[in-house]
Image (tube, rainbow, N blue to C red):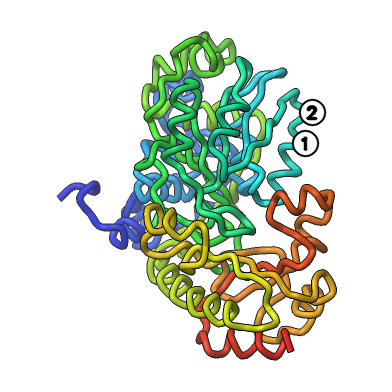
Amino acid sequence: MSEQDYGFDTLAIHAGAQPDPATGARATPIYQTTAYVFDDADHAADLFALRSFGNIYTRIMNPTQAVLESKVAALEGGTAAVATASGHAAQLLVFHALLNPGDEFIATRQLYGGSINQFNHSFKSFGWKVAWADADDVSSIAAAVTDKTKAIFIESIANPGGRVNDIEAISEVAKKAGIPLIVDNTLATPWLCKPFDHGANIITHSLTKFIAGHGNSMGGIIVDGGNFDWGKDGKYPMLSEPNSSYNDIKLYETFGNIAFAITCRVLGLRDLGPAISPTNAFNILTGMETLSLRMERHCENTQKVAEWLEANDKVEYVNYAGLKSSPYYDLAQKYTPRGPGAVFTFGLKGGYEAGVKVVSGVNLLSHLANVGDTRSLIIHPASTTHSQLTPEQQSKAGAGPELVRLSIGIENVDDIIADLDQAIG
């Protein structure tokens, strides 16, 4: 039986992992080392010239990290993956491989506030320009395409609004333009959504969130779909043209359907350096083993909390695609049939002051800037994660003054509801 034939839960435990050859340890060890001894001079030369795969330096690759990468690639159905220090680092390496100064990419406005800031501000230092479009209006994405556009970036489930995006429709825009579609699958995880099945070419995650699942480790990852022709039209010279730092090797010609992952590793990690630590990789691997069990409980609890809030007379609206009242309900049935995740928002009739009151009044829920923990989490985006945006940008990002974001954990759901009830008052 090949690894490809195994089910999701089996892959989450076993993919990419073997007993340690030196000790027989069944759990993947933490290889806490910076560098690795070469067999001989020829072996070292082959590694540095990309003629052979292997470990050189932990900034580029590490055995603990390698198991994590193999496991996520298997769960997503990708050809290869590259782990990074954070989700933001993963995004940086993706665009570093795709863009030159003066190039553009399209992103939907319905994104995590940190990504909006990264795209609007930090990426300017690289000469990269973002064009914003509306995820609910696919024609606006098509209208934003120019001859300088090199990629489209979306989230499968948008943070914080919980919108479910029409990946297939957006992928058609990308295909017509001859550019890759990048999907941040953080809030869904591969247990709920498989973007490659719907036309995505690259997937990113903040592993810090649901995949790790316990709020104790930072990490990000890039998954290569192996389904894009990087040599066509000369749009992506880092992949298709001779690379002078590796004896003029052409990465796409040499590595084929894993070329994008290789590029992010040997040019991105090598030169920009946002490597994941072996300890964080180990912690994330441990969390992944219970991913499906946790996501099932997350979604079950979230549905009940969302239904309770929708019936509360102090709540103005609830944005959760699991509710039949949601405009994203049908998309959720298509893309996330097991449930549209555990992160959603609701609006209070008292506006900004009511939002601040609720996050200040909870006892069981934790008021902090994270999602995807086993614990239930709460935040008021307008005063925190989206506070650097203008009121207009907050509104477009789905983070208005009355809005509260929840990340529902795996506690007893009656206790979660009771805490929200007393905090809303």
Amino acid type indicated by mark 2 = Ser
Displayed quadrant of residue 100: top right
Residue at 44% x, 26% y: name it: 175
The relative height of residue 237 versus residue 212 in the rendered view (above or below) is above
Residue at 24% x, 48% y: name it: 3
Residue 244 horizontal side relative to residue 288, left or right: right
Q: CA distance from mark 1 to mark 2?
A: 6 Å
Residue 277 in sight from this viewpoint? yes
Give the residue furthest to the left: 1
The relative height of residue 40 versus residue 320 in the rendered view (above or below) is above
Residue 302 horizontal side relative to residue 318, left or right: left
Residue at 55% x, 55% y: name it: 163
Circle 2 residues within 10 Å: few <14, some 14–19, many ≥20: few
The relative height of residue 86 versus residue 336 in the rendered view (above or below) is above
Displayed quadrant of residue 6: bottom left
- Residue 363 point in image, percent of width and height: 70, 86
Q: Nearer the viewer, residue 250 or 175?
A: 175
Local SS, label 2: helix
The quadrant of the picture occupied by the C terminus is bottom right
Residue 282 in sight from this viewpoint? no
- Residue 226 point in image, percent of width and height: 38, 30
Residue at 25% x, 57% y: name it: 7
For label 2, the residue is: 125
Circle 1 residues within 10 Å: few <14, some 14–19, many ≥20: some
- Residue 393 point in image, percent of width and height: 77, 48
Local SS, label 1: helix
Amino acid type indicated by mark 1 = Ser
Q: Nearer the viewer, residue 262 or 236?
A: 236
Q: Nearer the viewer, residue 238 or 396?
A: 396
- Residue 173 point in image, percent of width and height: 48, 29
Q: How many marks?
A: 2
Mark number for residue 122?
1
